[in-house]
Image (cartoon, rainbow, N blue to C red):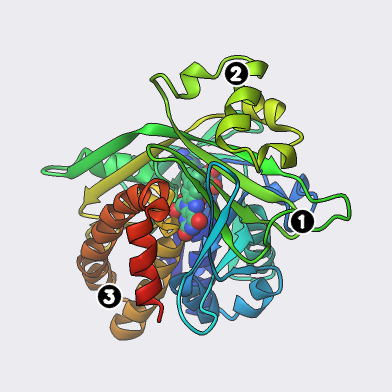
């Protein structure tokens, strides 16, 4: 194997794992480094835990490496939004015509499936517990830490794909190059994951094939179905203010608030207080940067290049689409990496910038407008 056929991917998240399958299909020899341990070692059950909405651009990318059918077996179609008002009354808006849907899939399950496929591929080596500490762009060298043994070492690599997420170390090296464009913007909202339990028969306590929303003007809760009959809820809520994470400090605060604001959900959430105190509050960031690449040496993709807030359900889908587009460019330009990387960033940047804006606008629509009767009427007319 010549040095030119070797590729290093930083990050074995959703995008890094899928990318490795695409590159291996083209005959490259891939090393994937991941700072976390192998999540399959502690993984209990496919279908539990946090879920994501998978849509067309994501499916297309999974089809490109022949794994869409496998994922489809464990994906739950959501054909529309189910709104829950303050009295627990329901109203429904279909997402499209003729059973068009987005799909709820388990993040862990998807990652495990991807990693199993990666493991079966002789062209890919996965290295867990290996954290990138520094990228030396001039020397094509990575300073690494084995987090299990605390051993430091360096790797030389002619080609580096940074799929190491929103706080990418690969991007950090690019940020220090001349005239680099970079911005990160946080919403004044955080999110917390909570859980609706299955009903006593182990079935879904709410309509299974819908994305549930409790729109409450300046904040909201959503819920997506899991295979085990539970729903993963996400509360998007201000950090500060009269009604905020800061204002809910005691068990009574939480029970009273949910009883008043989410009255139909509260009885379905037996672990609410423990979940509320134990689950971390996540922040919501938009990251934009440019360029995404340097010569033929380095390229960013996924959240490392374009982290967006989750209200459009498109972060992972956009990262998967990056893989589809890179693959098309490899078909067109062979080994001409500089052209591939340059075209990739030129084609993708306007699209991912647009998605970042749509995602922020959709927060306003989901938390507020979906409960507005005029909006409901417009949607009704559109869906005719
Ligand atoms: P990540 O998933 O962050 O993976 C990066 C990997 O790199 C990680 O495994 C990390 O451990 C590793 N890594 C990081 N730094 C280093 C280092 N220095 N050395 C070695 N390894 C490193 N998207 C959707 O499409 N649909 C949704 O419904 C949706 N819902 C969301 C809900 C929430 C609350 C949030 C926060 C996000 C949501 N997203 C959704 C977005 C989605 O989670 C991300 O876009 C997606 O995970 C990005 O994948 P990635 O592989 O680029 O990055």
Residue holding disc 2:
253
| Residue most extreme to the left | 179
Which residue is painted at 63% across and 31% down in the image?
259
196 to 7, vertically: above or below: above
User: Does the numbered disc 3 mark a residue whose Cβ is under 8 Å from ligand 1?
Assistant: no
Q: Are marks 2 and 3 in contact (CB under 8 Å)?
A: no
Query: Is there any visible trace of residue 137 in the rendered image?
Result: no
Query: Is there any visible trace of residue 281 in the rendered image?
Result: yes
x%, y% of residue 373?
Answer: 38, 57
Q: Residues within 10 Å of mark 3 (few under 14, many from 20)?
A: few
Rendered image quadrant of residue 374: bottom left
129 to 295, vertically: above or below: above
Give the alpha-carbon distance from disc 1 to disc 3, as whole Å. 49 Å
Residue holding disc 1:
229
Which residue is painted at 33% across and 68% down in the image?
378
Which residue is painted at 81% across and 58% down in the image?
203
Residue holding disc 3:
336
Q: Earlier in the sequence, mark 1 or mark 3?
A: 1
270 to 294, vertically: above or below: above
Give the alpha-carbon distance from disc 2 to disc 3, as whole Å. 60 Å
């Amino acid at each position: 194997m010549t040095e030119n056929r070797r590729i290093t991917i930083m990050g074995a998240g959703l995008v890094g794992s899928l990318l490795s399958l695409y590159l291996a299909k083209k005959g490259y020899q891939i090393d994937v480094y991941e700072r976390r341990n192998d999540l399959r070692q502690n993984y209990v059950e496919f279908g539990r835990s946090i879920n994501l909405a998978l849509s067309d651009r994501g499916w297309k990318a999974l089809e490109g490496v022949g794994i869409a059918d496998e994922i489809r077996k464990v994906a739950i179609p959501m054909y529309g939004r189910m709104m829950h008002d303050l009295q627990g009354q329901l109203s429904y808006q279909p997402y499209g015509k003729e059973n068009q849907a987005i799909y709820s899939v388990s993040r862990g399950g998807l990652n495990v499936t991807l990693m199993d496929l990666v493991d079966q591929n002789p062209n890919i080596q996965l290295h867990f517990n290996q954290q990138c500490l520094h990228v030396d762009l001039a020397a094509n060298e990575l300073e690494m830490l084995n987090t299990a043994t605390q051993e430091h070492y360096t790797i030389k690599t002619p080609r580096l794909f940074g799929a190491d997420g929103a706080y990418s170390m690969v991007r950090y090296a690019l940020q220090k190059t001349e005239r680099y464009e970079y911005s990160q913007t946080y919403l004044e909202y955080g999110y917390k994951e909570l859980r609706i339990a299955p009903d006593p028969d182990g079935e879904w306590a709410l309509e299974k094939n819908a994305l549930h929303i409790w729109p409450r003007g300046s904040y909201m809760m959503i819920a997506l179905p899991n295979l085990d009959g539970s729903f993963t809820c996400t509360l998007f809520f201000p950090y500060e203010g009269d009604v905020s994470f800061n204002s809910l400090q005691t068990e009574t605060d939480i029970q009273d608030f949910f009883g008043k604001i989410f009255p139909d959900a509260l009885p379905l959430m037996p672990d609410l207080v423990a979940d509320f105190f134990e689950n971390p509050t996540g922040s919501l960031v938009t990251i934009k940067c440019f360029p995404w690449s340097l010569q033929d040496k380095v390229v960013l993709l996924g959240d490392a290049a374009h982290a967006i807030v989750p209200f459009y359900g498109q972060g992972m889908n956009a990262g998967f689409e990056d893989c589809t587009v890179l693959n098309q460019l490899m078909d067109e330009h062979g080994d001409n990496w500089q052209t591939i990387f340059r075209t990739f960033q030129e084609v993708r940047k306007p699209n991912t910038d647009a998605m970042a804006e749509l995602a922020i606008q959709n927060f306003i629509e989901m938390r507020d407008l979906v409960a507005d009767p005029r909006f409901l009427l417009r949607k009704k007319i559109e869906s005719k």
